[in-house]
């Protein structure tokens, strides 16, 4: 049996390529849209991907199932859950597909997969027991998707907090509790292969270890240990869940109704800064600057968004850019492919051009107009607050804010700011803070684009709170 876990660092996501070496067939589980990388791994190992499946309708990235379906690969999807959470793009389509229910089995060569309905994170969520039929009739482990993580379980609040299904989180948490009881009945030696690792927004305390066992999670998974009673678990699992990125609702919708067929990866052309500014003025597009925050604050094109090309890039871009907007990148040329892949994985396909930081410096040296953002520390912040000369916006998570904050601050998580921007007053400058200055930097750029007068707070809040 061939088994490879494929990790995408920025979204902390695991896909799985599983193949039967006797027949040369393989299945891909939970793939992203850029499917060529999975095909390349299969080809390198003398395998052909004949089927593609996933554990649930994802919220944090666009699924690659439709891309595989377009290439004639059979797709297998959950038919569990209620009528609101069915794969609308699959059912009744011309694609080759199979709908899966609890207890169903299918095989890829000698490898057998048994479907387990494991709802809670989502109503339709399924997991797969994997059996190497060439060696045994008993499963070796479970592909748990967003049901069981290393050290955590999938958050049950997203139907409400991300997809807007009011009143869903309490009932979803109870359903997750029931699913955990079934997990507790599984053999301790089974391996657990999760859908995400540390850094994913699909849980609140995911571990960085890429796999586990049922027995280990029984003993050390804090969420499972909290499930001593239904109410204890509900209280624990819903407490302190971070605000989901704004783009999660769009991912849920598109993965249910059908992601746009991507086809070829976009190849944006290099253009001048003058051309970029002109195109944005005409099209109403957005400039996404991927430099570090210090370079951005010192000088940037008016109205640019900031999203450094780090682990938070997808989250920031997805929360601040709408799918229909035309995107122009400021990035080193050798990093353009990375940025494009990150964007298309969250459905931001309309990437129209790019310019480099060197071009931006050249534009500045020739007398082109760049804009800077005033940078202050927390000492100055308090002075402005005490004088009533500015507002303070704290863009940390609500749970962080409740642990300690500057009195008088308004709290809106940076991932929800676009949706709640009308709550931020405009009659005075807005000072934007977070824990270290990273989140407040991207939020400051977004507010500037919305014509707010901004003072960027680049300081460590914990050190300042200790002094108070």
Image (tube, rainbow, N blue to C red):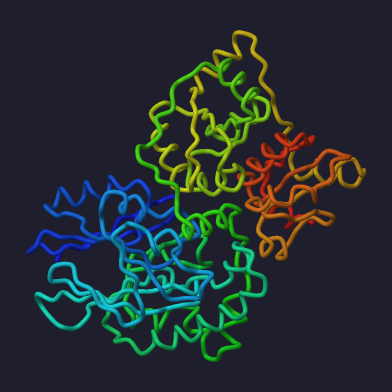
Q: Position of residue 22 (x, y in %)?
A: 7, 64
Q: In this image, 28 relative to 432: left or right?
A: left
Of the pair 204 and 383, the residue shown nearer to us: 204
Q: Position of residue 431 (x, y in %)?
A: 77, 42
Q: Position of residue 33 (x, y in %)?
A: 38, 49
Q: In this image, 45 relative to 308: left or right?
A: left
Q: In this view, does 185 lie above or below 464?
A: below
Q: Position of residue 86 (x, y in %)?
A: 46, 68
Q: Is residue 358 above or below residue 347?
A: above
Question: Looking at the image, which residue is at 63% across and 65% down?
Answer: 161
Q: In this view, does 106 lie above or below 432?
A: below
User: Residue 74 lies in what quarter of the image?
Assistant: bottom left
Q: Is residue 186 above or below residue 465?
A: below
- The quadrant the N terminus occupies is bottom left
Question: Looking at the image, which residue is at 23% across and 61% down?
Answer: 27
Of the pair 285 and 75, the residue shown nearer to us: 75
Question: Looking at the image, which residue is at 58% across and 15% down?
Answer: 274
The residue sitting at the top extreme is 366
- The quadrant the C terminus occupies is bottom right
User: Residue 16 lies in what quarter of the image?
Assistant: bottom left
Q: In this image, 339 relative to 209: left or right?
A: right
């Amino acid at each position: 049996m061939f088994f490879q876990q494929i990790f995408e660092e920025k979204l902390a996501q695991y896909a799985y390529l599983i193949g039967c070496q006797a027949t040369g067939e393989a299945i891909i589980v939970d793939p992203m849209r850029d499917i060529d990388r999975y095909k390349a791994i299969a080809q390198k190992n003398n395998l052909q991907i004949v089927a593609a499946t996933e554990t649930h309708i994802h919220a944090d990235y666009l699924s690659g199932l439709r891309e595989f379906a377009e290439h004639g690969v059979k797709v297998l999807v959950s038919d569990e859950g209620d009528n609101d959470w069915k794969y609308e793009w699959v059912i009744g389509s011309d694609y080759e597909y199979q709908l899966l229910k609890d207890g169903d089995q299918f095989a890829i060569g000698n490898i057998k997969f048994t479907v387990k309905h494991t709802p809670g994170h989502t109503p339709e969520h399924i997991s797969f027991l994997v059996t190497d039929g060439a060696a045994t009739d008993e499963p070796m482990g479970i592909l748990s998707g967003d049901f069981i993580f290393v050290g955590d379980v999938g958050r049950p609040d997203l139907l409400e907090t991300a997809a807007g299904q009011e009143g869903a989180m309490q009932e979803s948490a109870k359903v997750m509790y029931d699913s955990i009881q079934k997990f507790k009945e599984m053999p301790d030696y089974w391996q657990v292969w999760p859908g995400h690792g540390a850094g994913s927004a699909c849980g609140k305390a995911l571990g960085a270890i890429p796999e586990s066992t049922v027995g280990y999670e029984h003993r050390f998974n804090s969420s499972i240990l909290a499930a001593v009673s239904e109410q204890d678990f509900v209280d624990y699992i819903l407490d302190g869940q971070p605000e989901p990125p704004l783009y999660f609702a769009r991912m849920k919708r598109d993965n249910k109704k059908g992601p746009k067929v991507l086809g070829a990866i976009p190849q944006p052309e290099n253009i001048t800064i003058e051309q970029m500014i002109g195109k944005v003025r005409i099209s109403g597009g957005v400039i996404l600057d991927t430099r570090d925050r210090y370079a951005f604050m010192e000088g940037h094109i008016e109205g640019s968004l900031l999203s450094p090309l780090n682990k938070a890039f997808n989250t920031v871009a997805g929360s601040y850019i709408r799918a229909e907007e035309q995107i122009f990148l400021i990035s080193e040329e050798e990093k353009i492919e990375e940025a494009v892949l990150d964007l298309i994985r969250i459905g931001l396909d309309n990437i129209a051009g790019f310019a480099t930081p060197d071009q931006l410096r050249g534009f500045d040296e020739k007398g082109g107009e760049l804009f800077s953002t005033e940078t202050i520390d927390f000492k100055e912040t308090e002075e402005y607050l005490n004088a009533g000369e500015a507002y303070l916006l704290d863009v940390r998570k609500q749970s962080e804010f409740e642990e300690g904050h500057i009195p008088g601050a308004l709290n809106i998580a940076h991932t929800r700011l676009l949706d709640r921007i009308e709550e931020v007053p405009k009659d005075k400058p807005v000072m934007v803070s977070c824990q270290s200055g990273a989140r407040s930097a991207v939020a400051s750029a977004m507010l500037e684009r919305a014509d707010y007068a901004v003072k960027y707070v680049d300081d460590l809040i914990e050190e300042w709170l200790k002094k108070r």
